[in-house]
Image (spheres, rainbow, N blue to C red):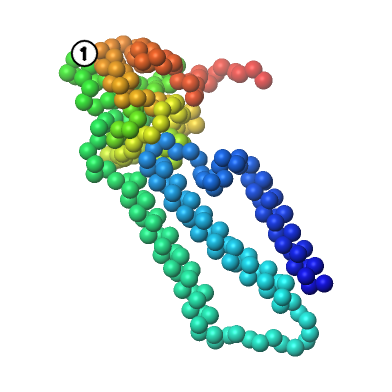
Amino acid sequence: MRRYRCSRVVRLSAMGALVALFATGCSWSDLPRFGWPRGITLQAHRMLHLWMAACIAALAVGVIVWGLIFWTVTFHRKKSEEIPRQTKYHHGLEVIYTGIPLIAVIVLFYFTAVTQNYVNDDSKKPDITVTAVAFQWNWEFDYDGVSAQTPQQVASTVGNSSTIPVLVLPTHKVVRIEEHSDDVIHSFWVPEMLFKRDVIPGVNNSFQFTITREGAFVGRCAELCGTYHSMMNFELRAVSPADYEKYVKTLAGLGNAPDRQAKALASIGLPPRAVTTKPFPTDRTVRRPA
């Protein structure tokens, strides 16, 4: 009878684990990352390593705890009115169940701090510097060090109600983003970078990263900033270093032409408009069809 009950507990535990796995909606390709999104920067990859290590440690602790629970439930059920042997004031046991969690927390804190310092490190000289200017409710990107038609101009792109601003950056280069706000608090966020940084009026925030793969990725404002906050989007285009150089030179040569972003993107064979998000209508009197 006891063997039957043990095998039943094992079967129920296995079924529960399978239900928990399939109920998460994750694909098999997500399983090694424990559901962590695919990052596009070296910093995102470092955060992935921290996440995987933390998940493995949590699973190890969970297996031990679950094992103790099932062992107690299975073998230490009430069998008679006799009081079982008590283990209070067991100093060795108390040291173990206090010391092990303390060590786990210290180790987790250490590696979290190391990863955080790596992500926030901006001591390395950047290859590219871009100034991101946030305003209600759009973005302007100025490519520092790239002169336009006159010394007073810089190569830049700015969004409006009919155009999504596209931030073009090279892969495998150290990129530095300098942030400024013209009005209220905004936040620069590209979900695939697994990172965001607030854009605060009067505060010069910045961060650095290195993109590892090409593609188009939506960028958003992640700080509630007013009526059109949810539509304050931009697009990040990660391209090869050669295409980036051609893009900024073309952009600079177009000066303040209203369609300079589209022409510069077309010059490197990319769609002239954003492909991950759309502009939003600013006329609130227009009624949409039901």
Relative placement, left or right, of 166 versus 55 is left
Q: Where is residue 165 in the image (x, y as percent from the top left)?
A: 39, 22
Figure quadrant of residue 249 = top left
**Residue under label 1:** 149
Q: Residue furthest front?
A: 3
Figure quadrant of residue 110 = bottom left
Identify which residue is drawn at 26% across, 30% down.
128
> Is the residue 11 above or below the residue 279 in the image?
below
Identify which residue is drawn at 60% across, 41% down.
28
Q: Where is residue 190 in the image (x, y as percent from the top left)?
A: 43, 34
Identify which residue is drawn at 41% across, 20% down.
160
Q: How crowded is mark 1: few (under 14 residues within 10 Å), some or many (20 or more)?
A: some
Query: Is residue 146 at least partly visible in the picture?
Result: yes
Kindly identify the amino acid type of the residue bearing the numbered disc 1: Gln
Q: Where is residue 196 in the image (x, y as percent from the top left)?
A: 40, 40
Identify which residue is drawn at 29% across, 46% down.
121
> Is the residue 208 above or below the residue 287 in the image?
below
> Is the residue 9 above or below the residue 259 in the image?
below
Q: Which residue lies furthest to the left in this view?
A: 151
Query: Is residue 182 at least partly visible in the picture?
Result: no
